[in-house]
Amino acid sequence: MDIALYEGGASRLEGKTNVLKLSSNENPLGPPEAAREAFARAARDLHRYPSTDHAELRAAIGEVWGLDPGRIVCGVGSDEIITFLCQAYAGPGDEVIHTEHGFLMYRISALAAGATPVEVPERDRTTDVDAILAACTARTRLVFVANPNNPTGTMIGEAELRRLAEGLPEGALLVLDGAYAEYVEGYDAGAALIAGRDNVVMTRTFSKIYGLGGLRVGWGYGPRAVIDVLNRVRGPFNLSTAALMAAEAAVRDRAWVTRCRAENARWRDWLARTLAEMGVPSDVSTANFVLARFADPAEAEACDAHLRSEGIIVRRVAGYKLPHCLRITVGDEASCRRVAHAIGQFKGVR
């Protein structure tokens, strides 16, 4: 009962039509056509149980990312991989480290496993490796770092990640949450780091750039011994056939990812620059959202209320200890212009 209920991004506004949802970091372009077609084909075999080993999807992920399929585990979103890790590696008397503005599921999953979550401060809304290492003890079992981070959009470089992995106490695992990794061109989300160490795991998702949030597919990659453990606690039929087929088609469509990354970068930069000109700054985002900072919590709440009156939903992030901020998903051109216009109205500048 110490677990606060997780609240997802709202999607409806009472009495409003033509609602613009920019609260859940969804890809406005949706999934590639190949994934839609694969999902439709899956309807022919709804009476059949799905694969238990996810071999085809793991092979596709391995091919695209240059990874060993035998070291990949698939789950119901990356959330389930996080749950598996806490279930398998943390319990009463153990500690699970997460950063000050990190994804709420780290704390929730740690508590559900009976472990003690340990919150570590960030530096200017960015992961602080020194603070994490200082917080480690002999009881530390898992260290969760989202890179890029949600809801801040900031990230740290490979050298800092390596320093963190090398500095962890024996018996602790570093978990790199790469839900937004595909939005950073050339970023391997920690794969090279994992290749040379036995204490690093990464998690990934199909819910963001691949546009499959409604199907809930994620995966993890790490040392063979860790993946073996996670597969032992994983339910045999945790992913449906439709989800597996759509995800396999999506990950193979590299051109779609390239297009989505470019469109996101274009309108993310435009939105951040436009808001800054209105007196609403944000850190440089490496994901598909902008964390808009207001003068104080009251102004953020007032702006959110104005946006809702205009039929626009963004994400309040007071639960992430950022009460003066609003997280705004980067939509398509029309969506970005609409939310920028509404904030300009609120600020009285356009």
Image (cartoon, rainbow, N blue to C red):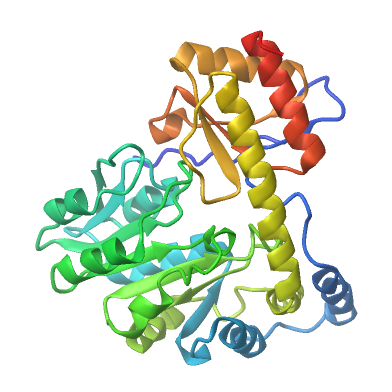
| Whole-percent x, y for residue 100 in the image | 32, 41
Residue at x 51%, y 45% (from the top left corner): 285
Residue at x 39%, y 42% (from the top left corner): 3
User: In the displayed image of the protein, which residue is found farthest to the left?
Assistant: 138
Displayed quadrant of residue 45 = bottom right
Q: Pick whichever, 264 or 56, lies toward us.
A: 264
Quadrant location, the N terminus: top left
Residue 213: tell me if it is visible. Answer: no
| Whole-percent x, y for residue 187 in the image | 49, 67
Q: Is residue 201 above or below residue 155?
A: below
Decide if residue 207 is on the left or right side of residue 242: left
Q: Pick whichever, 131 or 278, lies toward us.
A: 278
Decide if residue 88 is on the left or right side of residue 118: right
Residue at x 33%, y 51% (from the top left corner): 111
Decide if residue 58 is on the left or right side of residue 228: right
Q: Pick whichever, 50 or 288, lies toward us.
A: 288
Residue 311: tell me if it is visible. Answer: yes
Q: Is residue 16 above or below residue 12?
A: above
| Whole-percent x, y for residue 39 in the image | 82, 72
